[in-house]
């Protein structure tokens, strides 16, 4: 199991280096090599699903001595939530490599950066201590910087710098939190130990717990993003290339929520209890605000970006409610949103490659020329809205049900998010796909080819599978969700 | 039976590195004046001189193993951990910058030997300064080193900027020297001593609370003299102009050697002389640190000249290093780690600049590297690694050094300093990523054409970039070395 865990880091790194070493004259090989290596990682992740750590809480499996005189070691481990997120990221890297057009797939920088991004994301999800978590959290930025900066849209410079500065600003707080925790841990253990095992045995004062919770959570919430801190997201999504958007919406946003579930809540629970109401209010504002702004968008990519703000609001509402059901729902919603938003961005990418516009009003009646595309788009929209029987419903339903006990009024407002989602998604669908063809450019659009269909198919199948049989995905997170909700309940009782 | 030389503490191994450099200088002079020798002989002679210097530094390690911390030449020369680390660092700087300063000197045809002699002389001066126990020796070393650097800045006579740089460096540098000497004088007036160890003994004798004001002022003036050399704000004004005007091939050497030796001396001063009264300097150091990082970040954000950008970034980095030096013994070790990783990146960056713009050029606009990546992949990648290292991105040595430093500061409860330093880091991402954007990301028509990079340059850049990554992934060895340096001063 340790070998597989390390190879999740090393295989993407190795494949990225390999791609950089291949001469540019063999540019047709970049995509097959990338796909082959991401398939290896994907297979390993599937294997992890059946391994012994797939349904457990976080278990540190391996320790790597880093700076011995300070007693700092790097730890790596696995858990149910990590396994699911690793699987999600590997799947999304695989499908985005498959889906990108030739101008991207024949650029070694693009494929290489995507694989480097994969490396850093995998690192985040197997990190067993604050330092390695921070290292990979920051390392995410560089491949994203190149993906957005080189292959982005018109206004990419502004968007890239905004994205980088927002994230770095947030990570400064995580960094200070890490340093603070390390110094506190030094007082108890005599070394700067910040692995998750040591942290859970660290008894903090209430004021320390509050400060640390604020430091870590602020950094992670920027990444989620929560309502007032979300402004980098629409810019980043609009300017990023398709594969960048898929990874951004699919996995990078989850890194924030993952950090809160992994670090902020279990170790700084008192702080969580003090600030959870604030987070819940902000998330509900985010749900409604994101949905309303999405309705007003004329750019389909920006619409999906704002819908991400709304959907991630559900995740944060579930987390802040802190019950078993709601936390479980939040984790499942993270996975679901990764699949659906990834699929939506991929679909937008397909039509952008054909028409080089993303304005909703430039389309109309596309269903006639691209029937298969329209069907998949509608299906994915339904999943995103949360139609029963598809994956979006599972997470959102669990979150709403789980949160209702704690926040009756807030949850009632949040439920409107689902209705608003139906408005913006279906209205956009109606304007883009139904009716007569308005512009003659749309008359000769070719439907999805087999490569494109193959790249969207796994995501569509997963939407259906999770929607019909949510028990399967739930079984991986039961242990972790109950651990988190028990911790919260324990601290609540102590008060 | 004790001989006279033992009583006087005469031991030539202690000053062997300095002597080796001076000997090389004499041989070079001989080569030029008496018999005319071809260029490659001079290159050979100076390179062998540097290698011999490195060898003699290792001899000093042997001496240290038998003698321990001790002083020689009637307590004028000191052999301790700081001296050893400083010597090695100056030797490494000479070795790593040899390639660029040799090529620069080769281009200044009628002054090749002159330039080499200046460089080796300045290195010998800085070595003497690192070794000095006596403040007078310290001053002599500093002056030998600095005066050579002033001349080096203006060596390209035809270039107006170079002349300007030399004059500015000289005027402000001499002012700093005056301040330094005045500080020594004040200490001598108040305590009748001029030694690094004597100061701490005298202070412990009269009690930390009874230290006369003149001593304080004297110590602060000495520190200011050193802070001038490392370009910490508010003494940073010379740095951008000097970096910009001096021949690019020399800046890497000029910037690093002065920083290394001044910081090592400063660290020893803090660890030894100020050890009983360091609390009373907290405010002074804190103010300098905050001023440095803020001034550096504010000015760096808007530079269009990359050499000026690096100069202002140097002001920030000086602030970071200083923050560690002023916070405890482990702070000094963290600062030394920071210093070592920083000079590796700095030498790398100036090597890249001199490859791109030619050794003799003075100003280096950001447009000089637009579209660099297209034809010059290796240079761009190494350059990006150095810049990301300066920014402190994880997986590079810059992150480890910042992490150790900040952890130490936090354990000393310097929360304000930590906040300011970390906010500067965010700003840093803005201006450190900008050159990378221009070089690799931005689409542009007029790209830099393919530059023929010599194998020696490739090797050098490869080694420096590999070290930057290596110390980011496996910093253990270097951390242990810097911890060893300060262990005796706990």
Image: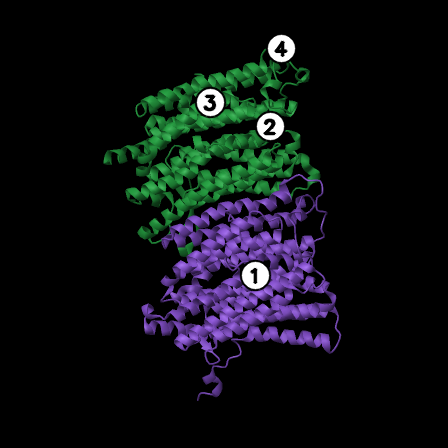
x, y percent for residue A277: 33, 30
Which residue is painted at 59% across and 57% down in the image? B347
Judging by the rendered image, the residue that carries numbered circle 3 is A291
SS at mark 2? helix
Check disc 3: other Cα within 10 Å, few if <14, some if 14-19, many if 20+: many
Residue A99 is tagged as 2
Residue A223 is tagged as none
Q: Earlier in the sequence, mark 4 or mark 3?
A: 3
Q: Nearer the viewer, mark 4 or mark 3?
A: 3
Judging by the rendered image, the residue that carries numbered circle 1 is B256
Kindly identify which chain the residue marked by label 3 belongs to: A
> What letter labels the chain drawn in green?
A
Kindly identify which chain the residue marked by label 4 belongs to: A
The answer as to whether the residues below labels 2 and 1 share one chain is no
x, y percent for residue B185: 46, 74
Alpha carbon separation for disc pair 4 and 3: 28 Å
Q: Is residue A427 above or below residue B39?
A: above
Alpha carbon separation for disc pair 2 and 3: 28 Å
Kindly identify which chain the residue marked by label 2 belongs to: A
Residue A451 can be seen, yes or no: no
User: Disc 2, disc 4: CB below 8 Å?
Assistant: no
In this view, the residue farthest toward the left is: A494
Quadrant of residue B255 within the rendered picture: bottom right
Alpha carbon separation for disc pair 2 and 1: 49 Å
Kindly identify which chain the residue marked by label 1 belongs to: B
In the image, taking residue B212 as reference, residue B313 lies left or right, namely: right
Check disc 1: other Cα within 10 Å, few if <14, some if 14-19, many if 20+: many
The answer as to whether the residues below labels 3 and 1 share one chain is no
User: Disc 4, disc 3: CB below 8 Å?
Assistant: no
* Rendered shade, chain B: purple
SS at mark 3? helix
Judging by the rendered image, the residue that carries numbered circle 4 is A436
């Amino acid at each position: 199991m340790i070998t597989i865990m390390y190879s999740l880091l090393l295989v993407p790194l190795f494949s990225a280096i390999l791609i950089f070493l291949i001469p540019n004259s063999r540019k047709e090989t970049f995509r097959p090599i990338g796909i082959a290596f991401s398939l290896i990682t994907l297979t390993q992740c599937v294997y992890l699903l059946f391994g012994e750590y797939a349904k457990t809480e976080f278990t540190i499996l391996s320790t790597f001595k880093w700076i011995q005189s300070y007693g700092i070691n790097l730890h790596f481990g696995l858990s149910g939530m990590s396994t699911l997120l690793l699987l999600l990221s590997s799947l999304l890297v695989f499908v985005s490599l498959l889906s990108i057009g030739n101008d991207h797939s024949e650029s070694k920088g693009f494929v290489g950066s995507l694989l480097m991004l994969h490396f850093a994301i995998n690192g985040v999800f197997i990190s067993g201590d604050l330092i390695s978590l921070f290292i990979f959290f920051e390392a995410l930025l560089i491949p994203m910087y190149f993906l957005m900066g080189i292959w982005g849209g018109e206004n990419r410079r502004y968007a890239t710098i905004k994205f980088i500065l927002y994230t770095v600003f947030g990570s400064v707080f995580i960094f200070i939190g890490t340093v603070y925790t390390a110094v506190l841990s030094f007082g108890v253990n005599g070394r700067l130990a910040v692995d998750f095992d040591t942290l859970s045995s660290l008894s903090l004062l209430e004021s320390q717990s509050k400060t640390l919770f604020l430091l870590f959570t602020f950094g992670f919430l920027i990444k989620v993003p929560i309502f007032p801190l979300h402004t980098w997201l629409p810019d980043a999504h609009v300017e990023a290339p398709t594969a960048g958007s898929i990874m951004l919406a699919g996995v990078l946003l989850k890194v924030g929520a993952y950090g809160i579930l992994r670090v902020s809540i279990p170790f700084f629970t008192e702080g969580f209890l003090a600030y959870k109401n604030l987070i819940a209010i902000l998330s509900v504002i985010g749900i409604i605000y994101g949905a309303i702004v999405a309705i007003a968008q004329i750019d389909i990519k920006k619409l999906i970006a704002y819908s991400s703000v709304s959907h991630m609001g559900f995740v944060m509402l579930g987390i802040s409610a802190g019950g078993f059901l709601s936390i479980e729902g939040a984790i499942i919603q993270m996975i679901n949103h990764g699949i659906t938003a990834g699929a939506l961005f991929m679909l937008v990418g397909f039509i952008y490659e054909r028409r080089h516009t993303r304005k909703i009003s430039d389309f109309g009646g596309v269903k006639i020329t691209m029937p298969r595309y329209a069907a998949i788009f509608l299906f994915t929209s339904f999943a995103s809205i949360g139609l029963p029987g598809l994956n979006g419903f599972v997470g959102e339903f669990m979150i709403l049900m789980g949160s209702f006990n704690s926040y009756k009024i807030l949850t009632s407002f949040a439920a409107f998010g689902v209705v608003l989602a139906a408005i913006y998604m279906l209205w956009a669908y109606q304007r883009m796909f139904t009716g007569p063809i308005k512009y003659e450019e749309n008359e000769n659009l070719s439907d999805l080819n087999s490569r494109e269909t193959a790249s969207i198919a796994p995501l569509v199948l997963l939407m259906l599978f999770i929607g019909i049989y949510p028990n399967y995905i739930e079984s991986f997170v039961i242990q972790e969700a109950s651990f988190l909700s028990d911790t919260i309940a324990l601290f609540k009782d102590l008060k | 039976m004790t001989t006279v030389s033992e009583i006087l503490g005469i031991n030539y191994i202690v000053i062997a590195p300095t002597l080796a450099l001076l000997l090389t200088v004499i041989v070079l002079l001989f080569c030029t004046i008496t018999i005319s020798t071809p260029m490659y002989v001079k290159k050979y002679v100076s390179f062998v001189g540097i290698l011999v210097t490195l060898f003699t530094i290792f001899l000093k390690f042997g001496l240290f193993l038998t003698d321990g911390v001790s002083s020689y030449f009637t307590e004028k020369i000191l052999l301790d951990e700081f001296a050893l680390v400083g010597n090695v660092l100056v030797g490494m700087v000479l070795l790593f910058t040899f390639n660029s300063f040799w090529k620069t000197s080769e281009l200044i045809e009628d002054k090749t030997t002159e330039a080499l002699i200046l460089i080796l002389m300045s290195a010998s001066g800085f070595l003497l300064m690192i070794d000095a126990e006596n403040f007078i020796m310290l001053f002599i070393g500093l002056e030998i080193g600095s005066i050579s650097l002033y001349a080096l800045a203006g060596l390209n006579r035809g270039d107006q900027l170079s002349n300007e740089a030399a004059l500015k460096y000289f005027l402000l540098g001499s002012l700093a020297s005056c301040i330094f000497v005045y500080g020594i004088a004040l200490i001598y007036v108040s305590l009748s001593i001029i030694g690094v160890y004597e100061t701490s003994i005298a202070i412990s004798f009269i009690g930390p609370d009874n230290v006369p004001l003149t001593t304080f002022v004297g110590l602060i003036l000495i520190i200011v003299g050193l802070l001038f050399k490392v370009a910490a704000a508010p003494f940073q004004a010379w740095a951008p102009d000097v970096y910009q005007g001096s021949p690019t091939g020399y800046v890497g050497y000029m910037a690093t050697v002065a920083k290394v030796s001044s910081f090592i001396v400063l660290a020893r001063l803090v660890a030894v002389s100020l050890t009983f009264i360091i609390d009373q300097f907290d405010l002074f150091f804190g103010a300098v640190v905050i001023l440095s990082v803020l001034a550096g970040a504010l000015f760096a954000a808007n530079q269009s000249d990359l050499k000026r950008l690096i100069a202002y970034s140097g002001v920030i980095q000086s602030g970071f290093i200083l923050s560690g030096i002023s916070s405890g013994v482990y702070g000094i070790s963290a600062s030394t780690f920071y210093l070592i990783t920083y000079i590796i990146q700095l030498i790398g960056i100036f090597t890249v600049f001199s490859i791109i713009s030619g050794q003799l050029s003075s100003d280096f606009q950001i447009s000089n590297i637009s579209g660099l990546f297209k034809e010059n992949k290796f240079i761009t990648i190494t350059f990006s690694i150095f810049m990301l290292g300066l920014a402190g991105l994880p997986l590079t040595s810059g992150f480890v050094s910042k992490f150790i430093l900040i952890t130490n500061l936090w354990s000393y409860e310097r929360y304000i300093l930590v906040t300011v330093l970390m906010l500067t880091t965010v700003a840093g991402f803005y201006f450190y990523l900008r050159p990378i954007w221009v070089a690799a990301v931005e689409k542009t028509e007029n790209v830099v054409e393919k530059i023929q990079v010599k194998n020696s340059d490739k090797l050098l850049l490869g080694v420096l970039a590999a070290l930057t990554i290596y110390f980011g992934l496996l910093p253990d060895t270097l951390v242990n070395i810097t911890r060893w340096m300060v262990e005796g001063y706990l």
